[in-house]
Amino acid sequence: MKNAILVNYEYCTGCHTCEVACQKHLGLEPGKYGIKLTQIGPDQISERKWQYEFVPVPTDRCNLCAERAEAGKLPMCVQHCQAGCMELGPVAELAAKMGDGGKYALFA
Ligand code: SF4
Ligand code: SF4
């Protein structure tokens, strides 16, 4: 079954740790990424509502840490996210978690 990474970005603090952990894991030079933090806002949506989010997005360099998965280890980004808002798992299983009204992004 195909795996994916689910990000519950409601809880992402924008700390960049996933970016750095991945860069180190892939041996990338500064400015190159296996996962890149993106920012939405701060954006005033309505009189009382602002949107300000961080969402890490895997790049085409990401192979979901396949070699680590084979060894029974978590992906480096998932392991180092102190907010615990990233998860690796089967696509269907992760997609099923997305209907609870939270803010999710699924990368397969
Ligand atoms: S799964 Fe591995 S390769 Fe993909 S973004 Fe996370 S650390 Fe980088
Ligand atoms: S490590 Fe976790 S909390 Fe920090 S930027 Fe990445 S996803 Fe967000």
Image (cartoon, grey):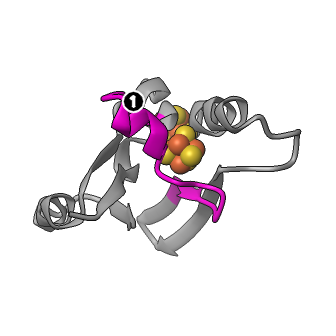
Q: Is residue 61 rendered magenta in the image?
A: yes
The residue at the far right in this view is 30
Q: Is residue 23 left or right of residue 90?
A: right
Residue 71 seen in this snapshot: yes
Q: Is mark 1 within 8 Å of ligand 2?
A: yes
Q: Is residue 69 left or right of residue 47?
A: left
Q: Is residue 87 rendered magenta in the image?
A: no
Place of residue 42 in the rendered image (x, y in percent of width and height, measured from the top left): 61, 59
The residue at the far bottom in this view is 46
Q: Is residue 25 left or right of residue 97?
A: right
Disc 1 residue type (three-letter): Ala
Which quadrant is the N terminus positioned in? bottom left
Element at badge 1?
Answer: loop
The range drawn in magenta is 52-75
Q: Residue at x 80, y 40 (%)?
A: 28
Image quadrant where residue 69 sits: top left
Residue nearest the viewer, comparing 89 with 16 = 89
Q: Residue at x 36, y 64 (%)?
A: 106
Q: Residue at x 77, y 34 (%)?
A: 27
Place of residue 33 in the rendered image (x, y in percent of width and height, measured from the top left): 73, 50
Please, is residue 53 above or below residue 77 in the view?
Answer: below
| Residue tagged 1 | 83
Place of residue 58 in the rendered image (x, y in percent of width and height, measured from the top left): 57, 57
Residue 13 seen in this snapshot: no
Q: Decide: few, some or many residues near mark 1? Use Cα within 10 Å; few <14, some 14-19, many ≥20.
A: some
Image quadrant where residue 17 sits: top right
Q: Residue at x 46, y 50 (%)?
A: 64
Place of residue 104 in the rendered image (x, y in percent of width and height, measured from the top left): 32, 61
Q: How many marks?
A: 1
